[in-house]
């Protein structure tokens, strides 16, 4: 919302109150103008970047589909990661898919079974296993459990049938609640390393 400070009788403050324009200081008006102008430019740039991202995605998918057709196949969908590199190796495009994983109530079943295993093993349980288990079920500040730590328990080579049952419960509790795709662009530097081309304002 843009104010016409000559014609509008009031300005709305951060608490929703209507403040008569004549009671607003000149520096507050100038700050308001500056912020609104820059925010308007940022919103326009956001729309430009959104259109840019969609065009790039369409171009990449069109190419991948064409590449599949070279072998008489059709590309089945947009899941999975894609890496494309220029002929001279200078540029690299990466499409990365990141699935958001959550656990259903069977995670609590697994936790109970694991607790029983630790009690059963008593002093025979290695301290590092207890530490891994405790860390796996810790929640962060938002109340979420670390997916990586929970799934990491499945890598422990423990043959106890109850432990194996718990690992099965963890696997079966996994639910994919959504996915997100990322487009990343890289340029190879003089040392031969691929450095990401920043499109984030904060990274420039």
Image: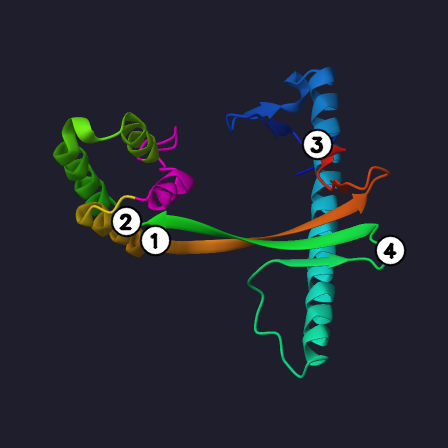
Closer to the observer: label 2 or label 3?
2
Residue placed under numbered mark 1 in the picture: 174
Q: Residue 32's x, y, as percent?
A: 69, 26
* Kind of element beneath mark 3: helix
| Cβ–Cβ under 8 Å for marks 4 and 3 | no
Earlier residue among tags 4 and 3: 4
Q: Residue 89's x, y, as percent?
A: 82, 53
In front of the other: 116 or 94: 116
In front of the other: 155 or 204: 155
Residue placed under numbered mark 3 in the picture: 202
Residue placed under numbered mark 4 in the picture: 88
Earlier residue among tags 2 and 3: 2
Give the CA separation, mark 4 to mark 3. Answer: 30 Å
Earlier residue among tags 4 and 2: 4
Taking the image as shown, residue 122 lies to the left or right of residue 65, namely left
Residue placed under numbered mark 2 in the picture: 167
Q: Which residues are magenta?
A: 137-157
| Cβ–Cβ under 8 Å for marks 4 and 1 | no
Question: Looking at the image, can residue 110 be seen?
Answer: yes
Taking the image as shown, residue 189 lies to the left or right of residue 170, namely right
Q: Is residue 17 magenta?
A: no
Give the CA separation, mark 1 to mark 3. Answer: 35 Å
Give the CA separation, mark 1 to mark 2. Answer: 11 Å
């Amino acid at each position: 919302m843009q104010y016409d400070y000559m014609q509008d009788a009031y300005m709305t403050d951060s608490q929703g109150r209507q403040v008569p324009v004549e009671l607003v200081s000149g520096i507050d008006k100038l700050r308001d103008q500056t912020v609104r102008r820059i925010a308007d430019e940022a919103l326009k740039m956001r729309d430009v970047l959104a259109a840019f991202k969609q065009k790039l995605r369409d171009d990449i998918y069109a190419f991948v589909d064409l590449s599949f057709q070279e072998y008489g196949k059709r590309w089945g969908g947009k899941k999975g990661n894609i890496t494309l590199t220029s002929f001279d190796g200078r540029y690299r495009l990466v499409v990365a898919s990141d699935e958001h994983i959550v656990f259903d109530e069977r995670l609590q079943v697994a936790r109970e079974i694991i607790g029983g295993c630790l009690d059963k093993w008593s002093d025979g349980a290695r301290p590092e296993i207890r530490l891994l288990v405790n860390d796996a079920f810790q929640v962060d500040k938002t109340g979420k459990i670390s997916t990586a730590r929970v799934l990491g328990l499945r890598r422990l080579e423990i043959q106890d049938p109850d432990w194996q049952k718990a690992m099965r419960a963890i696997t079966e509790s996994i639910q994919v609640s959504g996915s997100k795709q990322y487009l990343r662009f890289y340029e190879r530097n003089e040392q031969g390393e691929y450095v990401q081309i920043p499109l984030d304002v904060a990274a420039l």
